[in-house]
Every structure is written in structure tokens, then in C-alpha cells.
Amino acid sequence: MSAARVLTEDDWRWERAYLQEHRYDLAAEAAEAYPAGRRVSGTPLLTLPAWEPAKPVPLQDIALELTLSAPAGGQAWAPPDLAPLPGRPDGTRYPCYSEALRALAAPAVFENRPTYRLTEAQLAEAGLAAGPPRLAFTRGHYFDAVDTGEAAAHEFAAARLTGRPALLRALLADPCDLRRRPANLAISTLTLRRDGDRASFLLHWRDPAKVGHAGGLYQVIPVGIFQPSGPEPWHEGRDFSLWRCMLREFDEELRGRSEEYGTSPVDYDAWPFARRMTAALEQDQIRVWCLGLGVDPLTYATDLLTVAVIDSGVFDELFSLRPRSNAEGSVLAAREFAAHVIDRVVTGEPVQAAGAAVLRLAWRHRETLIG
């Protein structure tokens, strides 16, 4: 197919199906375009020195900033003449990748919800001066990242299939440059059930029929986009907390509860689950750490790598180790937190880049995490 030819809807579906089937291999191939020193612990996940703390950072030590004005130095992303967009039967062209995805291959959950868009990150001690680790955000929307990162992933798959040039990827250049594209931050949490000096962990298989990102891959659990719990303005300030976002994801992905919170603000102080988790955090029965930040080389998904170490008594009170289905795929059987198990998972199974990275880093820092 020549670069000048307009994609048909059937062309686009064929390329999208190839992307869905080969995400793991495509991510590994995409990572090869970057120096080994840019990758986290030998995984495909890309990072920067400022995003790699030398030791785990307690989650509560990370300062958050929210600026409501538009970020400076930005540009329009995914211009229609560069993004892999098909023509419609009536001769018009889909205006953006999210519109094509909604019409031609929408997953079960696909909504353009408000997000906190990441604009700056400093987690490593070397660049902190006298300040704490910090993450800065402005307002964003879920489809902003679909129209760039998922479009860039489609383009990469199409280049392998057809030889069509990857023009959008060339425009966006360095995936870790947060000035050149909108970055929705996902909080990817490895949950460790701690029993004395031993621990176990869960993995999540993401069903491609249910999710718009990373379908067919394994991932740690829970994982969720850092975003308000609803579109109403009162959610924005109350939900601007990494811990509160993680609480909602624990409830949804490990307890099977709905992610629909209605129009009223979530009352975290009155919510029994949130109260119990927060009390356990304050009593050191739960410990939550940040191990770094990274970007998927295929989709440009941007993940904060976190670990939640939960004492077995609290874990068994609130959660379960049994395999089961949930709204985004399947929770798999628990595995031992051990070097040979992690190596087998990371090297032998189709694990999302962020999941592989947080597993590797957690094992490196195991003495800090589980003692």
C-alpha cells in the first residue's frame, strides 16, 4: 500500500487487528529504537534519569501540583494528515483516531473522561534541589492519549505490515518528552500480599474485547488512569490524590465494584473500604512506594510504577487470591514473589512493559519493600 493511498475502513480494521494480536512483539521491537540505558531494568519500558529514584519513594512523599491553565509549549497532536485515519464510505475522513476506533472497533468501555494530564516529573534525588519528589499536572481527557499514543501504535504496526512511513511517531519524537504530547498518567501497582518474610502477587490479563489499551497482555493489578471519579467540577480537587485514585482501582479491579460513582463527590472519609485501607496505611499494615516512571515504547502509555505491600491479615480481610473475571479481563492465580517466578513471567509471558518493569524493580528493592 503506498503512503499516498487513503486507508479504507477494511484496511484500518486489518491493521488494527494486527496491532491487537502482536502488541507484545511490537512493543519489544519498538524499544529497540532506543539505547539500552533508556530502558528500565532491561525491559522495553523507557525512562529518563529524572524519573528513576535510586531507592523506593514513599507515595506520601510525592508532591502533586495541578495547574488549570493550558501547558506552555504544546502543539496540536496527531494531525489528520499524519495519523492513520481511514476514509468513510461517503468520501469523508475520520477526524481523529478515537473517532475511528469508536466507529470501527470500540472496546466495551470507551469514554472520553476527564484526566489529570502529566506535564512534569521529578522523582530522582539528583535533580530535586531542596524540594520533594514532584509530579505536575493540568487538565486532560482520555481520548487525548488515544489520538496520539494508540494512533502511533497503529502506525507502527502498519509500518511492519505495509511499509507505510511512521510520520506521527517522527513528529512526536522522544516519547518521554512531555511537552510534545498529552500524557495521561496510569498508576500501575504491584500488589504484594506479605506473610512474614514471604510474599505473593497477582497478575491481570487484559481482555482485548473489553479494553482500549494493552488488550491481550498481562499486567500487574490494580492499574488505573489518574483521573477524577466523575466529570463534575467538584470531583477535580477532591480526587487529586494518588492514594484516592488507587483506592478506587483496588475496589474496582480486586473487589469487582462498579467504577460509576454518580454525580456526588466521593466521601472517602465515610466510605468503609477507603477508611479501612487508610487506617491500615497509617498503622503500617499497608506500605506504598513509588519505584519510578516510564513510557511504553509502542503506545506511549505513561505509568507511575508503584508497589503496595499489604499484610496478609488486612489483605485476606479485604481481598481474595482466587482467580476470577472482572470488568477488564481476568485476575490470574497468585504467584510467589521470587526471582525465578519474576524471571519466568517477564521473559516468558506477554507482560505489558510497565508490569515487567515494576516486577523487576520490586525484586531489586525487595529488602526495603518486605524487609
Image: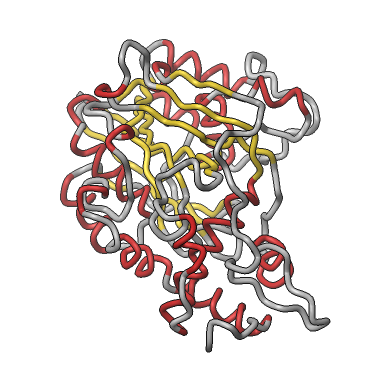
Residue found at the very far front of the displayed protein = 73
Quadrant of the drawing holding the C terminus: top left
Q: Quadrant of residue 287?
A: top left
Q: Position of residue 86 (x, y in %)?
A: 67, 76
Q: Which residue lies at the image location 31% right of the left edge and 50% below the top edge?
A: 356
Q: Which residue lies at the image location 55% right of the left edge and 74% below the top edge?
A: 16
Q: Is residue 101 left or right of residue 287?
A: right
Q: Which residue lies at the image location 67% right of the left edge and 83% below the top edge?
A: 8
Name the residue nearer the viewer: 141 or 165. Answer: 165
Up the image or down, 330 lies above or below 178; here it is below
Q: Position of residue 266 (x, y in %)?
A: 70, 24
Residue found at the very far right of the displayed protein = 90
Q: Position of residue 35 (x, y in %)?
A: 23, 55
Q: Which residue lies at the image location 33% right of the left edge and 49% below the top edge?
A: 46
Q: Position of residue 225 (x, y in %)?
A: 55, 41
Q: Quadrant of residue 91?
A: bottom right
